[in-house]
Image (cartoon, rainbow, N blue to C red):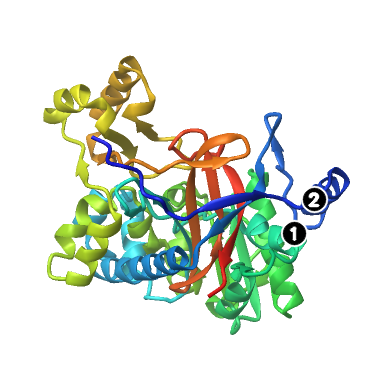
């Protein structure tokens, strides 16, 4: 049963641009900031408004994401070499030895999407520690929109955080899924930041990794000191050079290492409480921000069928909501089909309790917002907020630039 909606103090205001200025902003965003998909399927992918976050809520967001990042690091340290836990997280077995051999590293670029909910909690349904998109909009829009007005500020420190993270690396490999233009646009903006700061860079696929002279990792013939992985970890065993990754990968300083897959798995909530039962700080964070999550059990299918609006069905790994089914947003036939599919491979799926996101009035009507927060090396690094017509974020969700109240 839904409780009364909480007033989160969020508000919106339209861009202070006339039609010609808006056209020029979009042109510059596409050509200078590599944000090519300002339109997709005939729709504008940006909300021409600004989301205003009160100072107290911003402080809650920062505390939540930095606390969760630290707790996830503790979880990862406990389980990265535990084959049984890795299996239960849905991580492909060929990756287990790699995760076990990778050293701990502070190198991290993640995005946690926090949903303001009717019960007063900021909820996070999963952790994007793998391919956290939104670089171009997060830094580009504040730059192009300019002064947010008296009493407000942009929180767009992603560029500076990334440069600090790679400060000690002469040459950085930017590894991504080369078939996807939306992934390339992230690599181009990151390449520009690094190049402007004096770093060498090389773009390529993880399939381009070779072992060079004295064992130095090379990408397309260029020796590299560090790498940025923007490539789904579960795809790695399919690479033609996977054996090279098994030999060379653990010695390559990489933002986001493969051991972060323990954080990326949507089944993490299912196991976290068990692993962290002696960690009071983690348990408090889970109470405050995590939905209850259960392993998929065939014996409970009838219950989940009857309680459809209460549950969300998730595969351990997937991109942009492609293996997430919200019972409240599909009919009984689609829900039954999803349960049947999951029952064929129950170890790959989990079931999560639905939470109720508080909608917010935008110019286009009521939308469901999320405060997307970047975390680089454990510290908050800027907002990539979005909103959608339904309380479910997919590739169709719209980006909204975010400002924070000055204190």
- Residue 186's spot in the image, x, y percent? 65, 56
Question: Residue at the location (69% across, 53% down)?
Answer: 185
Q: Which residue is mark 1?
A: 145
Crowdedness near tag 1: few (<14), some (14–19) or many (≥20) residues, C-alpha within 10 Å: some
Left or right of residue 355: residue 375: right
Question: Residue at the location (69% across, 64% down)?
Answer: 148
Q: Earlier in the sequence, mark 1 or mark 2?
A: 2
Camera-side residue of 308 and 317: 308
Q: Residue furthest top?
A: 333
Which quadrant of the structure image shows residue 193?
bottom right
Question: Residue at the location (40% across, 35% down)?
Answer: 323
Say which element carries label 2. loop
Question: Residue at the location (12% across, 70% down)?
Answer: 278
Left or right of residue 3: residue 107: right
Q: Is residue 75 visible?
A: yes
Camera-side residue of 93 and 306: 306
Asked whether the residues under the numbered discs 1 and 2 touch, taking CB atoms below 8 Å apart as contact, a structural biologist would say yes
The CA distance from mark 1 to mark 2 is: 9 Å
Q: Which residue is mark 2?
A: 17
């Amino acid at each position: 049963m839904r409780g009364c909606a909480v007033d989160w103090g969020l508000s919106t205001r339209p861009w202070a641009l006339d039609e010609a200025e808006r056209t020029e902003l979009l042109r510059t965003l596409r050509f200078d900031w590599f944000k090519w998909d300002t339109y997709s399927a005939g729709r504008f992918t940006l909300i021409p408004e600004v989301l205003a976050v009160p100072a107290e809520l911003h402080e809650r967001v920062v505390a939540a994401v930095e606390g969760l990042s630290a707790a996830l690091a503790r979880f990862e340290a406990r389980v990265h070499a535990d084959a049984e836990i890795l299996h239960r997280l849905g991580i492909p077995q060929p990756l287990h030895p790699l995760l076990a051999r990778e050293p701990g590293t502070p190198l991290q670029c993640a995005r946690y999407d926090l949903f303001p909910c009717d019960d007063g909690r900021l909820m996070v349904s999963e952790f994007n520690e793998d391919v956290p998109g939104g670089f171009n909009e997060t830094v580009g829009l504040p730059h192009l929109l300019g002064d947010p007005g008296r009493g407000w500020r942009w929180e767009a420190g992603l560029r500076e955080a990334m440069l600090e993270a790679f400060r000690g690396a002469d040459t950085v490999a930017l590894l991504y899924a080369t078939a996807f233009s939306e992934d390339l646009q992230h690599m181009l903006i990151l390449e520009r930041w690094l190049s402007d700061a004096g770093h060498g860079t090389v773009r390529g696929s993880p399939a381009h990794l070779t072992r060079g002279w004295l064992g130095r990792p090379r990408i397309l013939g260029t020796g590299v000191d560090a790498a940025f992985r923007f490539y789904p970890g579960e795809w790695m065993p399919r690479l033609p050079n996977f054996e090279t990754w098994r030999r060379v990968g653990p010695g390559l300083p990489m933002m986001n290492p493969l051991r972060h897959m323990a954080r990326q798995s949507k089944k993490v909530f299912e196991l976290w409480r068990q692993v962290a039962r002696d960690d009071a700080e983690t348990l408090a964070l889970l109470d405050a921000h995590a939905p209850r999550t259960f392993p998929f059990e065939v014996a409970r299918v009838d219950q989940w069928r009857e309680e459809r609006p209460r549950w969300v069905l998730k595969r351990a790994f997937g991109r942009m909501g492609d293996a997430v089914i919200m019972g409240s947003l599909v009919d009984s036939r689609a829900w039954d089909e999803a349960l049947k599919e999951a029952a064929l491979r129950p170890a790959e799926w989990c079931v999560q309790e639905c939470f109720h996101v508080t909608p917010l009035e935008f110019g286009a009507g009521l939308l469901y917002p999320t405060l997307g927060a970047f975390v680089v090396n454990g510290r908050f690094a800027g907002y990539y907020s979005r909103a959608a017509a339904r309380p479910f974020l997919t590739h169709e969700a719209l980006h909204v630039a975010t400002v924070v109240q000055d204190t």
